[in-house]
Structure formats: structure tokens, C-alpha cells
């Protein structure tokens, strides 16, 4: 049985990682610089998400672009792109996190922080990625 506190901790870590990745994008800074400039400690979970998302960015972008009919990466809202990159990192590298949790959290963040259509778009792209990289 999963620990609800652990779920909340991971949710908070994903949201903090999204903030930091967005900051790096908007300030056009390397994520390492954004991480090192934080006044408050960055948890290990947040650091793993940020650094892992950056490390798998090229592969994630390939997967996202191949499944985004009619949308280039540049045309996508920054939040959508960032959420999908982070979720793709988790699908590829964090086998301890259930596929359904990765998808649900990504869709929730897209709905909460992006456009009205983002939840459906992110879900469709990530479901297709998940079917390839982590079937079942």
C-alpha cells in the first residue's frame, strides 16, 4: 500500500522542479546555475527531477515531437513542454514510480498551470510515450 505522505511529498517535489525548470527556461540559464542559486535547500527529490529532466531532455524532445501531431516543440506552451519532459524522464528512468502516477501527476500539473486544453494534450502525448517506453 502506498504512503499518502510520500505521494504528497512527490507531488510537491514535482511542482518545485517545474518551477525551477521554468525559471531556467525563462532566464535562459543552465539548470545547474538555477539550482545553485536557490536561497533555500533543494531536496534530493527535486534535484533528481530537475537534473534528470535536463539529462534526458534530448530523448524526451524526440519522443514528444514524434507524438505531437500538428505541434512543434517550439509552438507548445512552455509549461506543457516542461511537464512532458519531466514525465518522460520519470517514465524512462524512475521505474519505482508507477506509470499511472507519472501520467496523472503530469496531467494535473498541466491542467493547473497551463491552458484549458493542456491536460488532454499532455495526456495524449504522454500515454503514447508510455505505451512505447513502459508498456502495461
Image (spheres, grey):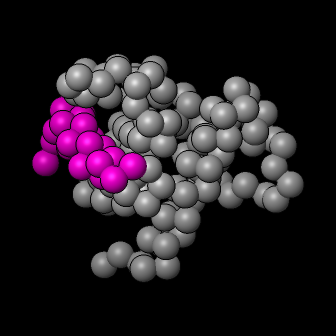
Q: Could you tell me what secondary structure mostly forms the magenta stretch?
A: helix
Note whether residue 98 is visible: no
- At a point 23% along the width and 23% down the height, the residue shown is 70
Name the spot of residue 18 as percent of width and height, x first. Answer: 56, 48
In the orientation shown, which residue stands out farthest toward the front?
A: 116
Residue located at (50% from left, 63% from top): 10
Q: Nearer the viewer, residue 12 or 47?
A: 12
The residue nearer to you, when weighing 81 against 40, is 81
* Residue occupying image coordinates x 61% and y 56%: 16
Q: Residue 104 vs residue 41: left or right?
A: left
- Vertical relation: 68 (above or below) 100: above
Q: Is residue 69 visible?
A: yes
In magenta, the rendered stretch is: 115-136
**Left of 29 or right of it: where is 9?**
left
Q: Where is 136 relative to 112, above or below?
A: above
Find out whether residue 134 is within the magenta segment: yes
Q: Residue at x 79, y 58 (%)?
A: 41
Amino acid at each position: 500500500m502506498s504512503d499518502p505522505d510520500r505521494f504528497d511529498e512527490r507531488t510537491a517535489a514535482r511542482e518545485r522542479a517545474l518551477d525551477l525548470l521554468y525559471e531556467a527556461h525563462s532566464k535562459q540559464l543552465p539548470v545547474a546555475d538555477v539550482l545553485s542559486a536557490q536561497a533555500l535547500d533543494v531536496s534530493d527529490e527535486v534535484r533528481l527531477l530537475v537534473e534528470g529532466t535536463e539529462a534526458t531532455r534530448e530523448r524526451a524532445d524526440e519522443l514528444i515531437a514524434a507524438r505531437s501531431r500538428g505541434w512543434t516543440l517550439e509552438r507548445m506552451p512552455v509549461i506543457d513542454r516542461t511537464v512532458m519532459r519531466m514525465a518522460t524522464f520519470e517514465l524512462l528512468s524512475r521505474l519505482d514510480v508507477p506509470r499511472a502516477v507519472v501520467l496523472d501527476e503530469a496531467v494535473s500539473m498541466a491542467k493547473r498551470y497551463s491552458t484549458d486544453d493542456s491536460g488532454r494534450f499532455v495526456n495524449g502525448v504522454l500515454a503514447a510515450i508510455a505505451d512505447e517506453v513502459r508498456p502495461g
